[in-house]
Image (cartoon, rainbow, N blue to C red):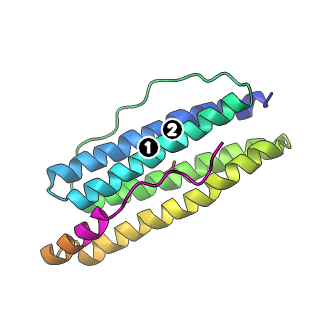
Amino acid sequence: MLDTKVTELLNTQINKELYSAYLYLAFSNYFTDEGLDGFANWYQVQAQEERDHAMLFLKYLQNNSEKVTLEAVERPVQTFESHLIVLEAGLAHERYVTELIHTIYDAAYAKKDFRTMQFLDWFVKEQGEEEKNAEDLVKKMNLYGSDPKSLYMLDTELAARVYAAPSLVL
Ligand code: FEO
């Protein structure tokens, strides 16, 4: 059995990851409407990764004989003023998720819950990568977003992203 507080935070994280998926689907829909299919693809793949994250938390709880409680997923914002604002919101969201992961880690550390800490190590690394990806998108949009030809090329680059299952298997 896991500590009550650790279990509660892990359970909440399922919801946060599903919300992340929902948020990125909203981003994807926005870019589809804007005619930027590459950006739409990029965020659709990202949404799939977030669903995987949710399932990893769910499975970890079940593997430790903890009951999972599913809560309502919040409605994401769906109107945006510019392409850049979406990308900046993505970066801010990933930084927020990093804080959430660190909070769970803190709780596990306080309880000497080495198993959960080891499970979370993958997410700590993953968040580093996700923040970097989000930062890169913001940088690229700042550099190229105002030139239609460059934006087209950036969109083409993002169209190439393909989904890959997570390297963490439970
Ligand atoms: Fe599951 Fe992008 O954090």
What residue is at 53 percent from the left and 38 percent from the top? Answer: 54
Q: Residues within 10 Å of mark 2 (few under 14, many from 20)?
A: many
Query: For residue 138, which quarter of the picture?
Result: bottom left
Which residue position is annotated with label 2? 16
On screen, residue 88 versus residue 5, left or right, reads: left
Would the CB of label 2 be found within 8 Å of ligand 1?
yes
Residue type at tag 2: Lys
Would the CB of label 1 be found within 8 Å of ligand 1?
yes
Q: Position of residue 164 (x, y in %)?
A: 46, 55
Which residue position is annotated with label 1? 20
What residue is at 15 percent from the left and 54 percent from the top? Answer: 34
Outermost residue on the right side: it is: 112
Quadrant including the N terminus: top right
Q: Main secondary structure of the magenta part?
A: loop
Q: Is residue 94 above or below residue 133?
A: above
Query: For residue 134, which quarter of the picture?
Result: bottom left
